[in-house]
Amino acid sequence: MANRGSTSRVWILPRFKDPYWKEKRSSPKDYYVGLREEWKFRVEEQEGLVADLRNMGVRIPHRRSLEMPRTNKHDYEAAVARIKEENNRMLMRRSRYFMLQLAIEMAEANDRELTENEHNNALNNEKYLSDYAMSDEDM
C-alpha cells in the first residue's frame, strides 16, 4: 500500500460535460438536476469500467457509492464524490494494466522477457497507484 501522504492523488477521470456546479448558489434547482444527471452518468461509466476490469482480471475497488443514500442534495453530493473517487481508481488500475501489457510487448519485441524489476516498475508508477485506502475505507 502506498503512503498517501507522500504523493497527491492523481485524477485522470474526465470532467462531467455539464458545469452544473456553477449553479449551486444561483439556481439550487438546476444544480440538483445536474447533480442527479452526473450520478446517472457516473453509474454508467462505472458499469463499463467494472466490465473492463473483470475482463482484465484486475481487482475491483469497493463500490460503496451504489449503496449510499440519495434522498436529498447533500446525500447526492456525497454519493457523486464517492463514485467519482471509485471511478478514478478504476481508471488508474486500467491504466496500470495497459502500461504493464505495453512493457511486456516491448520486451517480447526485443526477444526477451520482462525482468521482475521492470514488471514492478510498470505496476508502481506513482501517478497510477490505486491501492491506497480511499477516504472512508481500509484496504
Image (spheres, grey):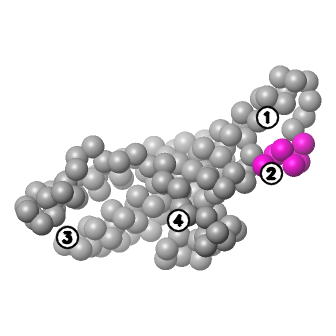
- Where residue 118 appears, as percent x and y from the top left, is 84, 44
- Residue annotated with mark 3: 73
Marks 1 and 2, how far apart in space? 12 Å
- Residue annotated with mark 4: 62
Marks 4 and 3, how far apart in space? 23 Å
Sequence-wise first label, 2 or 3: 3
Viewer-side residue, 75 vs 48: 75
Viewer-side residue, 91 vs 47: 91
Marks 4 and 2, how far apart in space? 24 Å
Say what secondary structure mark 3 lies in: helix
Residue 62 drawn above or below residue 20 = below
In contact (CB < 8 Å): disc 2 and disc 3: no
Say what secondary structure mark 2 lies in: helix
Nearest to viewer (mark 2 / mark 3):
2
| Amino acid at the residue labelled 3 | Lys
Judge whether residue 69 is colored magenta.
no
Question: Mark 1, residues whose alpha carbon is within 10 Å: few (<14), some, or many (≥20)?
Answer: some
Residue 33 drawn above or below residue 57 = below
Marks 1 and 3, how far apart in space? 47 Å
Dominant SS of magenta comes to helix
Q: What's the magenta region?
A: 115-121
Residue depicted at x 45% and y 43%:
48
Question: Mark 4, residues whose alpha carbon is within 10 Å: few (<14), some, or many (≥20)?
Answer: few
Sequence-wise first label, 4 or 3: 4
- Residue annotated with mark 1: 104
- Residue annotated with mark 2: 120
- Where residue 23 appears, as percent x and y from the top left, is 14, 58
- Where residue 126 appears, as percent x and y from the top left, is 66, 55
- Where residue 124 appears, as percent x and y from the top left, is 72, 54
- Does residue 59 appear in the picture of this structure? no
The disc at residue 16 is none
Left/right placement of residue 116 relative to residue 30 reads: right
